[in-house]
Amino acid sequence: MQVERVQTWVMSALLLTTALIFSGGLTALAASIDDRDSSRGGLLVIAAVVGVMGMAGVRALNDKSVLTPWLAAGLLPALVGWYFLYVS
């Protein structure tokens, strides 16, 4: 395997891990806010944007098309948080 390819894989893993941990942290912060506060939705929107941008960054880093169904995977932490905060 070429060194450049391994470096790309490592950078992709670091980028995606950092983005999803940050997105999950924002989701956990939204869960810890009092019910009377209206900033829960804003934090979940920011979490969704961070997740999607992380996935788009990984796609761009690997010279792939950014517009792909894989962007929906970046929404996962925010969608899980939305489900537990608003649906159940």
Image: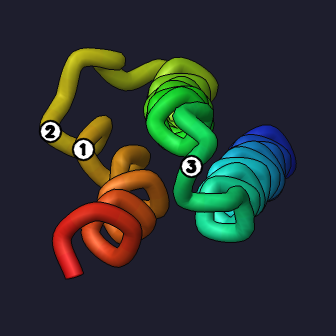
Is the C terminus in the top left, top right, bottom left or bottom right quadrant? bottom left
Measured Cα–Cα span from mark 3 to mark 1: 30 Å
Measured Cα–Cα span from mark 2 to mark 1: 6 Å
Looking at the rendered structure, the secondary structure element under dot 3 is loop
Looking at the image, which residue is at 55% across and 43% down? 40
Figure check: 28 above or below 65: below
For marks 3 and 1 on the same chain, the one whose residue lies earlier in the sequence: 3
Sort mark 3 into few (<14), some (14-19) or many (20+) by Cα contacts within 10 Å: few
- Residue designated by label 3: 36
Image position, residue 50 (x, y; %): 60, 32
- Residue designated by label 1: 72
Looking at the image, which residue is at 63% across and 55% down? 30
For marks 2 and 3 on the same chain, the one whose residue lies earlier in the sequence: 3
The kind of residue on which mark 2 rests is: Pro
Figure check: 23 above or below 50: below
**Pointers 2 and 1 in contact (C-beta within 8 Å):** yes
- Residue designated by label 2: 69
